[in-house]
Image (cartoon, coloured by chain):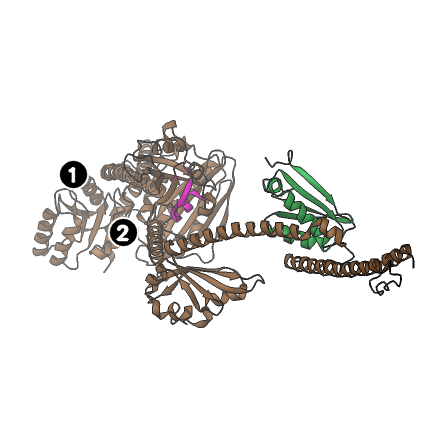
Chain colours: A brown, B green
Amino acid sequence: MSLEKILQSAAYIKENPASPLLPISTDAKFAPVTYFLNELLEENRSLRQNNETAFHYIRQKIDQLLLVIGTIPLRPEELDNATIIQLDPIGIIAESFTQILDHQRQINDQLELAMDEIQAIFKSVGGGILVVDSNKKIISYNRKLEQMFDIKEDQTSDLSCSDIICKGHPPGLCLFDEMLKTGRTVSMSTGCPQDTRHYSIVITPIKDRNDKIVRAVLLYIDITELIEIKEAVANEKERLSLTLKSIAEGVVATDSTGSTTLMNEVAEELTGWSLGEAMGKPACQILNIQKRSETHSCSNIFKDILSKDSTFQRVSQTVLISKNGKERLITLSAAPIRREEQSSPTGSIIVFRDITQEKNMEMERIRSQRIESLGIVAGGIAHDFNNLLTAILGNISLARRMAKDNDAISTLLAETEKASSRAKNLTSQLLTFAKGGAPVTTLTSTRKLIEESAKFSSSGSNIKCHFDIADDLWQVEIDEGQIGQVIQNLVINAGQAMKHGGAVDIGAENIIIDPNDDISLTPGKYIKIYVKDKGEGIANQYLDKIFDPYFTTKETGHGLGLSICYSIIKRHSGLISVASEQGAGSTFSLYLPAADQQLREQSQQNAPTETTEKILSGQGKLLIMDDEQIIREVASQMLTYLGYSVELAADGEEALQKYRQAFDQGAPFDAVIMDLTIPDGMGGKEAIEHLLRIDPEIKAIVSSGYANDPIMANFKDYGFQGVMPKPFSMEEASNTLKKVLTKS
Amino acid sequence: MNDLETQKIINIDMRGQVCPACLLVAMDTLNRHKEALKNGSETLSIKTDNREATTTIPITAKNMGYSVTVTKIGSFYQICIGFFTPENKK
């Protein structure tokens, strides 16, 4: 074998490691070469084997590192050995680990810091902290919790939270269980009671990577004082609210900008705003005050009150217009709210009071006093006038009898008598206004009275009455004559207001007067009668005067009609009021107190007695007692003319003396006519008591210029047999005497 | 320093390559650009179509302390690695 052939074989054997080595050459010349080549081939085979082992090891380490990093092993075909050497995966991974370690170190540092922070919080926090595992076993707690629940350190091994904190609580109320159920932070801020204290609790879960709750942090904060303060504030609020509720004044509070922050029920009622609506709105929008002047405008009041040096302010009378347009007269005071003296106000308080009713009552009282004073004057004049008229009428009566053959004188006297009769009517009206006579009341159903009185006044006129009277109208205790007169007057007025005629609405209804009603009446049950015309109405400036006597806007009339109405209604403890609009008509309203009793039969005692116009002569012995000489004289002449014999007395004492003397002498008087009142002396009322003791059978007649005096109305109750109101005509005198004397 | 205007973006397109080669290339780049990536002057943007790489690369980068976002863009994923502030995150 040639050398060339040997070298070719060696190259083949090198590339094919499974093939046998070179055969030792038989040629002695090439034997050493063959031997050397075989040694080289064996060494090559050994080196290759080592190389394979090394790469296998490297790949194994690379795969191991890749697995640690979190990925899959290298596939052999992915990178050949040469590329592995070139890429240096181990170097890359090692370098990456350096970065990972650096990062971990940083995280560790942060974690340590965070742990320190948590420890600091754990120690210094104002609440008790308890850490438990998912089975409520205590892991740790801070010093505050120890103090709160008086825990001894050696007590807590193997204990659960319920052993030291929720002792005695029903198991169903465990907040921890709720946290486990929801997986979220749960809290109880209302205060969990424990012994005598209250705690707010917050439980926060701590979860692992799989979102499983492994621990929980429980934070306990002692809120006992907070709860006590809250209760105190609530009590204080309740007290304030009750105070505000129970006072009669409206109260509105504002902040420093004048916006409403509080108002009580009275303020709600007076302003028409509810607290909900008013909250935060400018108080001036709520308190719509009628501006009397710039200084009294709402905005100015607030500007002053909320200024630095402000003081208390008072507005004595102003008109408050509510949201629904109702106007009320109020007094208002405003004061700043200051936390400390000298400081700027933090708000204001406005207190206001509805004085509409008070004002109305005051006006009514003034009117009542005025009319009463006028009544005293009118009554006095009427009384004196009646005395004078008695003399005039008496003398005319006498003169007419004496001049019966002289037509001219008779006619003149008849005219004079007529005029005197009108004067008598006038004094009678004046007296009704002045004294009215205490109303002689009977329990009455007013329906018939209203209808009859109205029809009586409207008959023959061009007005028509429309009635709207409630069926269940309460009964009233009234003087039918007087109330009838009132209704007649009102209907006559209504007719006069409607010059071209028309309908007058007359109605009656039951009404209950409430203490809050703006009406000057004692609260209670009333009937309200109204008379409504569509006439020319009453000018505003006259409304306050129409009830004054002798005030009239009519060309005819005395101006006594409404005064009498006022006076009569007042004496019935009622009220008369008027509402009028010029051009649209007037409505007069009467309020009469309803009676509690049932209707009883009307007393016949005061039924009017019919009088005849005939002169009835008579005979007998009469005693006339009157302080006025002219009355004594004219009465003496009239009665003498009628056929009686007459003796006179100027007062009660004289009458008593004369009566006793005649009685003792066996020639008693057949009748006595006595004046009811004698100034500075014994009048008829006292004298009859003495006379009855002398002669229980005495026939006494009472006479008075106060025709409406209660004694005149109920004369029989006082022992009189008859009544003779002054002035009396000869006919009236003769009739009364005849009636009394013929009584057995 | 690390606003979007001046930030340099290192783009590596590894589409067609699979893990772990992709991961090794990403790690190598993260190692070599460590300083610039951490001070925010550079970010690394890798395009890959290997799904596994979208898990392994972000996990490793996060372990090294980087912020990572993965966005699917058409047929491939874009993995952005760097230090993101809330302003330059987008």
Can you say whether A271 is above or below A670 in the image? above
Three-letter amino acid code at the position of disc 2: Ala
The N terminus of chain A sits in image quarter:
bottom right
Q: Which residue is mark 2?
A: A713
Q: Element type at marker 2? A: helix
Give me the chain letter of mark 2: A
Between A702 and A538, the residue placed more toward the observer is A538
Residue A266 in the magenta stretch? The answer is: yes
Can you say whether A164 is above or below A246 in the image? below
Residue A215 in the magenta stretch? The answer is: no
Query: What residue sits 16% from the left and 38% below the top?
Result: A629
Query: What residue sits 21% from the left and 54% below the top?
Result: A720
Residue A536 picture location, percent across and down: 48, 34
Between A623 and A139, the residue placed more toward the observer is A139
Q: Which residue is mark 1?
A: A629
Query: What residue sits 65% from the left and 50% below the top?
Result: A91
The C terminus of chain A sits in image quarter:
bottom left
Q: Is disc 1 in the same subunit as disc 2?
A: yes
How dense is the environment of label 2, judged by Cα within 10 Å: few (below 14), some, or many (20 and up)? some
Q: Residue furthest front?
A: A28
Inspect this view and state whether residue A556 appears: no
